[in-house]
Amino acid sequence: MAQATCFNPTLLETGFARGQFEARPDDGLELVDCRITNAVRCVPPENRPVGAEVKACNAFLTAEFAAMPNLKYVLALGGISHNAILDAMKVKRSQAKFGHAACHRLESGITLIDSYHCSRLNTNTGRLTPEMFRAVFETVRKGLKEL
C-alpha cells in the first residue's frame, strides 16, 4: 500500500473522489467535499523537511485555510502536517497532541483529525493498515453528514 495506491482508492471508497485515478493530470479524477494541500513539500534526503522549510511554507498553508471560510474538518497526514496545521491556525501544540485517529475540536470550530502518513515506511511496516486509513476518512465523512 504505497502512498498513491492507498490514498486515491481511499478517497474513492469513502466518497471524497469520483472517477478513476491513473496518475495523469487528465485522468478525470474529481475531488468531492474535499481539498488537498501540502503543509510542506517533502523532498529527499530522507523525505523529511527541516524546521525552516515548514516555517517558510506555513504562510501558504495559512492562506489556504483563509480561502475556505466554510471549512469544518481538516485531516492531517502525519505529525509534521498536524503541527503545521496547528501553527497555521495559531493553536498551541500542547492543546492538541498528535495521535492516529485522534479528533481535536479547535476553538475556531474546525475539527482536526489525525492519521499516520500513508508513506511506504508506515504502510510496509503495518503501522498504518488500509483499514486504519479508511476508518479515519469514514470519521470525516460521518462528521460532514451530521452538519
Image (tube, helix red, strand yellow):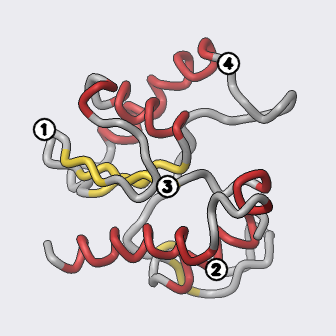
- The amino acid type found where label 1 is placed reads Glu
Kindly identify which residue carries mark 1: 107
Marks 1 and 2 sit apart, C-alpha to C-alpha, by 32 Å
- The disc, 1 or 3, on the residue closer to the chain's N-terminal end is 1
Where is residue 55? Give x, y as percent. Answer: 52, 17
Amino acid tagged 2: Pro
Q: Which mark is residue 9?
A: 2
CA gap between label 4 and label 1 equals 28 Å
Image x and y of residue 47, in percent: 78, 35
Q: Amino acid at mark 3?
A: Ser
Residue farthest right in this picture? 45
Q: Quadrant of the N terminus?
A: bottom right
CB within 8 Å, label 2 to label 4: no
Toward which corner of the image does residue 72 lie, by quadrant? bottom left
Distance from the alpha carbon under mark 1 to that under mark 3:
21 Å
> Which structural element holds mark 3?
strand
The residue tagged 4 is: 50
Residue 120, quarter of the rendered image: bottom right
Of marks 3 and 2, the one in the foreground: 3
Q: Is residue 83 left or right of residue 25?
A: left
**N-term-proximal mark, 4 vs 1:** 4
Check disc 4 and report its element: helix, strand or loop: loop
The residue positioned 54% from the left and 86% from the top of the image is 13
Horizontal side of 42 relative to 40 (left or right) equals right
Inspect the image, locate mark 4, and give the three-letter code of the amino acid beneath it: Val
Tag 4 near tag 3, CB within 8 Å: no
Secondary structure under tag 1 reads loop
Q: Residue furthest front?
A: 126
Q: Residues within 10 Å of mark 1 (few under 14, many from 20)?
A: few
Which sits in the foreground, 54 or 103?
A: 103
